[in-house]
Image (tube, grey):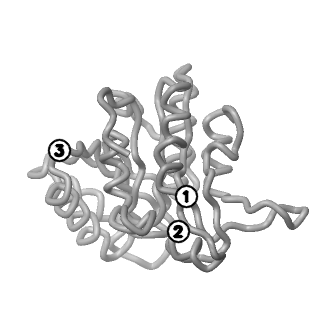
Amino acid sequence: MTPIDKPPRGLFVTGTDTDVGKSYVAAIIARALVAQGRRVGAYKPAASGCRRDSAGGELVSDDALALWQAAGCPETCERVCPQRFAAPLAPHLAARAEGRAIDDRLIGTGFDFWRERSEVVVVEGAGGLFSPLSESRLNIDVASEFGLPLLIVAANRLGTIHAALATVVAARAHSPALPIAGLVLNDATPNVDDASRATNAAELRRLLEPYDVPLRAAVEFGRREFVDTAWILA
């Protein structure tokens, strides 16, 4: 797949790591766009660690299902995540465990499906920004090919400042032309005894300013919306 000539409007929602709440944040964004009257496409190129449906047949990605529902259930959930695997491994390794392989062409055509039918596309990666999506492509490679700015999600916990700054610096070094829309700090767990949770937002605002990466939101655990949504399509 080659980069498209006219990038669509949207975001590639990624994370500093796995289990930081990027699916939760992606769903918040999709709901906000639907509330604005936008026709929203939802796409997760590949998912691993999927469960079997109640009939024990089809694999279901709960992350993709939540994103599809947040976008207003456009088209089918199958279209949201066309490549699903059971093992809780990187997608290409989960595929290999099933005697299969990631379809690199489908990563692109699956996105094209939504690009052609939507005003804005919310894409959620798998794992962290530099996690592999296939044998040859990382999440950041796919974001660049899609032509979508990054929204980086970081969990509000001790160590997040390093993880966030490292992700921003690495993204700029790897793909200088790829815009970064900002960072969202997410309470991925309920209240815990972690004093850094009270100071991380202010520190990130200060430390990200030289990189021109704004802290877009600090999402409290269980909150289902952003206070400010104007930036999403700015």
Q: Is residue 56 above or below residue 97?
A: above
Residue 171 percent across, percent down from the top left: 22, 58
Q: CA distance from mark 3 to mark 1?
A: 24 Å
Q: What residue is shown with label 3? A: 177
- Mark before the other along the chain sequence, 2 or 1: 1
Q: What residue is shown with label 1? A: 46
The amino acid on which the numbered mark 3 sits, given as a three-letter code, is Ala
Q: Is residue 6 above or below residue 71?
A: above
SS under mark 1: loop
**Residue 50, image quadrant:** bottom right
Label 2 with label 3: CB-CB less than 8 Å: no
Residue 5 horizontal side relative to residue 12, left or right: left
Instruction: Name the outermost residue toward the left.
Output: 210
Q: What residue is shown with label 2? A: 91
The answer to which of 122 and 117 lies nearer the viewer is 117
Instruction: Name the outermost residue toward the top.
Output: 37
The amino acid on which the numbered mark 2 sits, given as a three-letter code, is Pro
**Residue 6, image quadrant:** top left
Q: CA distance from mark 2 to mark 1?
A: 6 Å
Residue displayed at 21% across by 64% down: 165
Residue displayed at 45% across by 63% down: 133
The answer to which of 139 and 192 lies nearer the viewer is 139
- Quadrant of image for the C terminus: top left
Residue displayed at 42% across by 50% down: 13
